[in-house]
Amino acid sequence: MLPTDRSFPPWGKAERGGDGRHHLAHHCADVAACFEAIVDQSVVRARLERTAAAALSPKALSRLTALAFLHDVGKLHPGFQAKAWPANVWRGPLRGHVQAGADLLLGYLPPAMGHAIGITAIDSWMTTSNILIAVLAHHGRPFKITERSREGWETVSLREFRYDPLSAAAEYGQILEKWFAPAFSAGDEPLPDRPRFHHLFSGLVALADWLGSDTRFFPFRAEFDPEYLDIARGRARQAVAAIGLDVASSRAAAQSRTSFAAATGKPEANPQQHLIDTAGMDEPLLILEAETGSGKTEAAFWRFAKLFEAGRVDGLYFAVPTRAAAMQLHRRIDGMLQSFLAGAPLEAFLAVPGYLRAGVAEGHALPDWRVRWDDAATADEAALTARWAAENARRFLAAPVAVGTVDQAMLAGLKVKHAHFRAAALCRSLLVIDEVHASDRYMTEIQVALVGQHLKRGGHAMLMSATLGSVARARWLGLSTAPDFNTAVAAPYPAVWRRNGTERSTEVPLRQKAVAITTLPTMAPEAAAACAVTAAQSGARVWVIRNTITAAVATWHAVRAAGAAPLLLRAGGGPALHHSRFAPEDRALLDECVEAALSPHARPAGGCIVIGSQTLEQSLDIDADYLLTDLCPVDVLLQRIGRLHRHTSVERPVGFEVPGCCVLVPERGLEPLLAPQFENGLGAWRDQAGVFSGIYRDLSVLELTRVLILEHPEWLLPAMNRLLVESATHEQRIADLHAERAGGWADYRNTIIGAELAQGGAARLALLPVDAPFCTMQFPTDEAPIRTRLGEEGARITFTTPVTGPFDKPITGLTLPAHWSRGLDTIAPVVPRGDGDALVIEIGPRSFRYDRSGVARMARRGEA
């Protein structure tokens, strides 16, 4: 029996603000049992064995489980135990348990302590200490071993209190050997000593620790129970099934339901979607190129359904570039999921920080990390428990099915806290990345590495794009060279590409869309507004997309100043526009209003103007009669045009029977931007470090796109997709442009390429080094630059109580852009004050105004 008499038994979990305690051995058993149950899943086992490069025997699995039990062994330190001791018992400094665990397991303490734990036998299981360090790093970050916790291990003995860490360690070691006896059986069988194996093992232990620490599954028991491991194993199996890590019941429901109609709820697959059906289960990576509106989303879900039924994946993470796209796509994926599993209790989760959504249910965050779901009164307990992964952004990738932003997946491949946990959770799933053309060099470098890591673990991935340039495609496929221009243009389209570079294309003739495309030599908001108003007054549903939020807001104000406010998108009883700087509750409303205004189904009569930024260009099911857009790279332009005349069933107003697109270009052309200059998303500026920054910086690609519009006033799509994309992005065409033009075109692009190479280098430095020994890995002390560069959101401002926002809906707070957030203290909730139809939020010397145009910075108090 563990310490008796005056002794205070070691605890592993303590009730915050209360007296509840969970015995240390019990908590360690909970985590070990969760690890065992997770690794018992065939997909997870396959991923772990893939990284081990060998099958794992029962003895090896028992040893790994025993190591998971040891994850919190450092909590035996008196300086940690003192956190829950009576006052005045401990007078030394409080300690963490990670360093203390390293001291115990790596032999930095007197031999008696290591002997008590059984370290001699444990050392025989491995050839290096990397796996011990991996199991101790379960709190999300690797650690640097110091001497700080090598002191204070003495017995604490008072008249009414006694704690002997040596005695506690001996009893802990006895429990370890008894509960995991197969691990200590005779025979040499060292655990795999491969870095990839250690990194994945660390993430799986972290996942087990998150689950094993949840009191909904593992209630506290302070008094030691010698038979507790059996209890923990039963609870762990229930927990793993309850949160969707064990998908046996869902997989049973999926049997014989992988036809396109059953999986997606759509009647039959089109030629582009049938391309996916030609790929076998053994193809780990597919790239689907097909035009916008061709059903790539359904094709990806069909791929998931087939892999899921076959037991190749246990989940799906569908990654898109923006929050708006994720929120809209979530509803579609959840609808397909319900069709696929025919009523089985599985929901798609929305993986967007700041939102809590599972299926059609909305959640509300409560103190202590709890969540109140709006269907709590009617949903059964099993359905509520199954939302475990949806209730915390760190757990998003553990969802059976989730739709979220690509940055959430990228966090699994970077040196940021909880990366190993995220990567281990993700390894079970089909990773789908939509709009892969939309990323810059930094993002692409990380995504390529993430997908590579995922595939090397035996995972499956699918990438999608309207048209992917041959250079980018070669990068994704891992090919050493890209094809020449003529070969690239001749490549089939649409197509599915495999990892070895081979493709399959449909031979069925596709519907062609002839787009009349022109340029307007101005980027002034008044000119854009006038063009939009003229089209809307003729009955057209006009989509205006500006490259920056500043230009979008200015254009919106210009329409109102022209007396055409009634033509603008309506939301909450007044005019509105769409971009990223709105409260989450208002963004949800704006998404719905945009989809209603540009619906391909029941669209209102009369003209309308929908103005927005890039948040509208990806994955939204909208259909415009006329498109007014800023100049952008040709692949992005094709993406935007994909939302123009998307459905043939829509009746168009007179004068707009043919899809028309007007592209706004700088009045003076692009050459002045070589200075460098920046104009509404085009070109670049030098930041404080002298680095070129911007949105669409490659002026050569932009100029070639502009020339294509002039040379081809009608774009026949998708027949011309390859020609258009390669003519603006292929290195041969760029070289031809530089040879034709005087001035600094080549010099400017060389500078941009240098900046991109620097971005790529920065990205590589930020990557999680899964091929490096675990003991050599350290994370940066400040992760903010990595997260900010990812496009992570800035400071989250919460209000003390919900307030009525500009759209007459209660809102709970705002998220600021990252570059507005530096130096802001946003821990404490704030009280906004009303200012007419707006809210004013004051944080220290800074003020922000929130109205129908979004959140904007105000001059600092004291400034003119």
Image (cartoon, grey):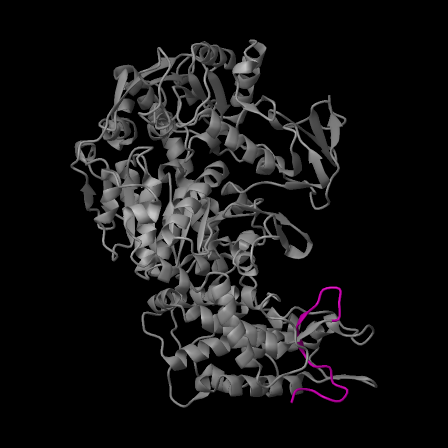
Inspect this view and state whether residue 69 appears: no
Instruction: Please give left or right for residue 702 compared with residue 480 in the image.
Output: right
**Residue 398 coordinates in the image, percent (x, y):** 47, 57
Instruction: Please give left or right for residue 785 compared with residue 219 in the image.
Output: left
Which corner quadrant holds the C terminus? top right
Residue 269 colored magenta?
Answer: no
Secondary structure mostly seen in magenta is loop
- Image quadrant where residue 321 sits: top left
Which corner quadrant holds the N terminus? bottom right
**Residue 817 coordinates in the image, percent (x, y):** 58, 36
- Image quadrant where residue 281 sits: bottom left
- Image quadrant where residue 654 sits: top left
Residue 126 to residue 186: above or below: above
Q: Nearer the viewer, residue 340 or 566?
A: 340
Q: Residue at x 54, y 86 (%)?
A: 118
Residue 10 colored magenta?
Answer: yes
Considering every residue shown, the one lying at the far front of the view is 378
Which region is colored magenta? 1-19
Q: Residue at x 33, y 30 (%)?
A: 635
